[in-house]
Image (tube, grey):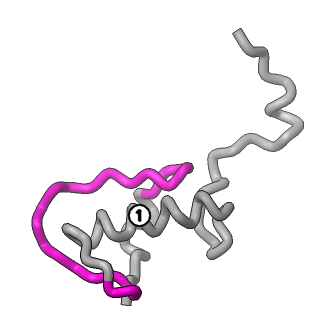
Amino acid sequence: QDDCSEFRSQFEAGGRLSCTRENDPVRDASGRQHTNKCLMCAEKFKKEAQRGGQSGGTGQRNRLPTSERTKQVRC
């Protein structure tokens, strides 16, 4: 089981998660091996963000509402 709940609070918009480089191999639900659990979760979050956060992730949490985005001036 690839429970990534412990990393969700560290996850940034766009699927970015800062991970260490420790070597502690784990396999995801599909059987693919990852260097460590954080890197496995980082990949999972990135895929969720690309799909628009369908699984309830926070991929959209830092986006401004459309009304606010149109008020921004581009330099």
Quarter holding the C terminus is top right
Whether residue 12 appears in magenta in the rendering, the answer is yes
Picture mark count: 1
Magenta span main SS: loop
The residue under the point 66% across, 54% down is 60
Residue receiving disc 1: 43
Please tell me which residue is depicted at 55% across the width and 50% down the height of the picture: 13
In percent of width and height, residue 59 lies at 60, 57
The residue at the point 13 percent across, 73 percent down is 24
| Front in this rendered view, residue 5 or 51 | 51
Residue 35 drawn above or below residue 33: above
Query: Which residue is outermost to the bottom?
Result: 1
| Quarter where residue 68 is shown | top right
Question: SS for tag 1?
Answer: helix
The vertical placement of 6 against 12, above or below, is: below
Please name whichever residue, 61 or 26, is drawn nearer the observer in this view of the structure: 26
Left/right of residue 44 with respect to residue 18 in the rendered view: right
Q: In the rendered view, tell whether residue 49 sits above or below residue 37.
A: above
Q: Amino acid at mark 1?
A: Glu
Crowding around mark 1 (Cα neighbors within 10 Å: few <14, some 14 to 19, many 20+) is some
Is residue 67 part of the magenta span, yes or no? Answer: no
- Residue 58 is left or right of residue 71, and the answer is left
The quadrant in which the N terminus is found is bottom left
As drawn, 13 above or below 8: above
- Which segment did they paint magenta? 11-31
Residue at 45% across / 57% down in the picture? 11
